[in-house]
Image (spheres, rainbow, N blue to C red):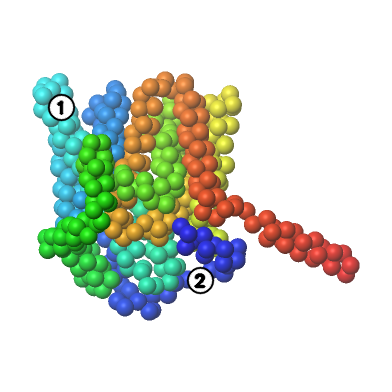
Amino acid sequence: MVREAAHDQEQPLLQPHQSPSLNDLPFPSFLIDYLYAGHFLARWGARTWEFSVGLYMISVWPDSLLLAAIYGVIESASTALFGSIIGELLDRLSYVKVLRLWLVTQNLSFIIAGVAVTVLLICSTLRSTNFGAFILLIIVTNISGAVGVLSTLAGTILVEREWVVVISEGHSPELLTKMNYIIRRIDLTCKLLAPIVTSFIISFVSLKASAIALALWNIISVWVEYWLFLSVLGGIPALGESSQKRLLRLSPTNVEDSSSTSDMRKSLLPHDEGSLAVVEKRGGWKIIERFSKVPFVGAWIVYLQQDVVLPGVSLALLYFTVLSFGILMIAALEWNGIPAYVIGIARGISATIGIGATVAYPVLHSHISTLRTGLWSIWSQWACLLVCVASILVKNNILSAYMLMGGVAASRLGLWMFDLSVIQQMQDDVPESDRCIVGGVQNSLQSYLDLLGYVMGIIISNPQDFWKLILISFLASTLAALLYTLHMYRVRKHLIHFEKLVMVFKWSLRSSEIATAN
């Protein structure tokens, strides 16, 4: 962070935008396209399941949202509990093993979930005729879906937090920025188009056909994804070198050398220092040391030691919200009499604005740096959410609902730009040895707060009290913006270049005087 602060002081506030060139890369540029294509295939399957699972659960138990809510809790809880462990596990495996574990687990899980859902939909009377088999299939669907989401998290960490950084090292900083926003654009495009394609299959064919299509997609795509990612790994020298470093670091010989080196250092300590170390390791200190070695605890300790912890917490707080087109907000909108197709169109507009963030981010980033982009984006998101708060005061339910949808959709521009800013700060400032661990904990923290959002909806379950959830969500967004502003001030020691604003004002005043004189 000190490096970026110094860089900020040397940079002018506004800089011309420069597009990174791929001509000087030491590998064929089509390999980056392979990376994008593989990421698209993986994200399409994940986004299809994300959209479809709620519809499946509602169809299986039409008179209640209970199954959909339970699935949401299980998915969020599994990511919250195991997200940090996933990061540590990835840090201990070679790239090839991570690829196999990620792709096989993700696609196999969604295949099993798709088959289980298909059986539930075909045997629609199973709940009344064989309740035990019905519950078993529900459990299989929930567990398979949760495992699929966890493996998707592993792929996200590998591609977004690890590979793009390794590939861009030694090149222009604009290359990392470009890869980040293209990967985010791919994800948001899948978020926009996958529900549309799935909804067409559901509307014009059937729910069963969409579940079968989901299973078939994962059966076919897993082989293509593996070939694409393996081609990228084998064709880009930087990834090969990084993989070799991992193998050396993970080799038993290297571990033994590290242990012997540590023992040698202890033996070279002065007698007094050695005695002091022995005394310190007795009692409470020894317990703390052992506690810190527990994988879950150790990962959080690594995360909390990073300079980017405040931006990470700020981003995670934005997940503690109902101000998104999720289950709770959609239910509230339907209760207010908004047609389903209108909600679908609004969700599409929201995703389109999110894609627009991937276009605006590199332009803004090239002019005002990563830190400032994060500041401007999170406060612009906060400003859009003021419309949602204002909707509480409107007595007309229909108008209030449209204001709510409009505020949420508009806020996606700032939200996704802030997301890109925080990701890039973590890529720049987290050491390579901690990158996977920090990525796992970050996703785990986001899932904890997402889970709390579901719990918040259970506590305040009456649609008439949805305004309370809006206020709580807005307060969480406000806290996130304030924490990031504090981080910005700690790094740069100021928030606004007042002297530059004065210069701009004087220049404008002088220009107007010259124009008046002429």
Location of residue 124 with respect to 45 vertically, above or below: above
Q: Report how far apart the C-alphas of labels 2 and 1 lie in the structure.
A: 57 Å
* Image position, residue 492 (x, y; %): 55, 55
* Image position, residue 479 (x, y; %): 50, 38
Write down the quadrant of residue 512 in the picture: bottom right
Please state if 397 lies on the left or on the right of 246 as rendered.
right
* Image position, residue 292 (x, y; %): 25, 43
Residue at 57% x, 53% y: name it.
493
Which one is earlier in the sequence, the residue at label 2 or at label 1?
2
Mark number displayed over residue 50: none
Please state if 204 lies on the left or on the right of 402 as rendered.
left
Q: Taking the image as drawn, is residue 275 in sight?
A: yes
Q: Say which residue label 2 marks.
A: 18
Residue at 23% x, 29% y: name it.
60
Q: Could you tell me the amino acid type at mark 1?
A: Ile
Is label 2 in a helix, a strand or a loop?
loop
Please state if 438 lies on the left or on the right of 243 as rendered.
right
Q: Taking the image as drawn, is residue 82 in sight?
A: no
Is label 1 in a helix, a strand or a loop?
helix
Q: Say which residue label 1 marks.
A: 135
Q: Name the foreground residue: 180 vs 357.
A: 180
Q: Could you tell me the amino acid type at mark 2?
A: Gln
Nearer the viewer's eye, disc 2 or disc 1?
2
Q: Name the foreground residue: 174 vs 198.
A: 174
Q: Local crowd at mark 1 within 10 Å, few (<14), some, or many (≥20)? A: few
Location of residue 501 with respect to 137 vertically, above or below: below
Q: Name the foreground residue: 114 vs 407.
A: 407
